[in-house]
Amino acid sequence: MIAPCGPPKKEAGKRKGEAQREACHKYNSAAGCNREKCKFDHRCTKCGEKGHGASSCSN
């Protein structure tokens, strides 16, 4: 077995030490998410930014 060289590659859009959760599909729909405690990340699936869903993304 060969040991990996160096640390694993950092995923785009993640800060060091921050685990990225899956984006909430309901949040990205026109109806939006109405879950009281949603386990998914409320970010746009088009551009990755927080504060709006894909249904209202200008990108």
Image: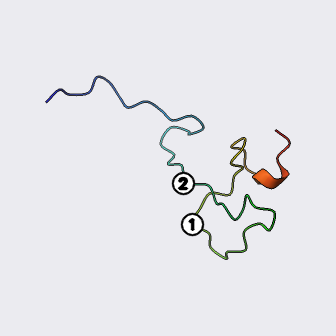
Q: In the visual, does 38 lie left or right of 19?
A: right
Q: Tag 1's secondary structure? A: loop
Considering depth in this image, is 53 or 5 the residue closer to the camera? 53
Of 26 and 52, nearer the camera is 26
Separation of marks 1 and 2 at Cα, in angstroms: 8 Å
Q: Is residue 51 visible?
A: no
Q: Amino acid at mark 2?
A: Arg
Coordinates of residue 33 in the picture (x, y in percent): 72, 68
Query: From the viewer's perspective, is 49 left or right of 23?
Result: right
Q: Does any portion of residue 16 appear in the rendered image?
A: yes
The C terminus appears in which quarter of the rendering? top right
- For the view shown, which residue lies furthest in the top direction? 5
**Location of residue 49 with respect to 52 vertically, above or below:** above
Q: Nearer the viewer, residue 29 or 40?
A: 29
x and y, in percent, of residue 7 in the image:
35, 29
Number of numbered discs on residues: 2
Q: Quadrant of residue 34?
A: bottom right
Residue 16 percent across, percent down from the top left:
50, 37
Residue at image coords 81%, 54% = 55
Dot 1 alpha-carbon crowd within 10 angstroms: few under 14, some 14 to 19, many 20 or more: few
Chain-order first, disc 1 or disc 2: 2
Q: Nearer the viewer, residue 7 or 48?
A: 48
Q: Are marks 1 and 2 in contact (CB under 8 Å)?
A: yes
Is the residue 8 above or below the residue 18 in the image?
Answer: above
Q: In the picture, residue 4 is in which quadrant?
A: top left
Label for residue 39? 1
- The residue at which mark 2 appears reads as 21
Residue lying at 69% horizontally and 52% vertically, measured from the top left: 43
SS label for mark 2: loop
**Amino acid type at mark 1:** Lys
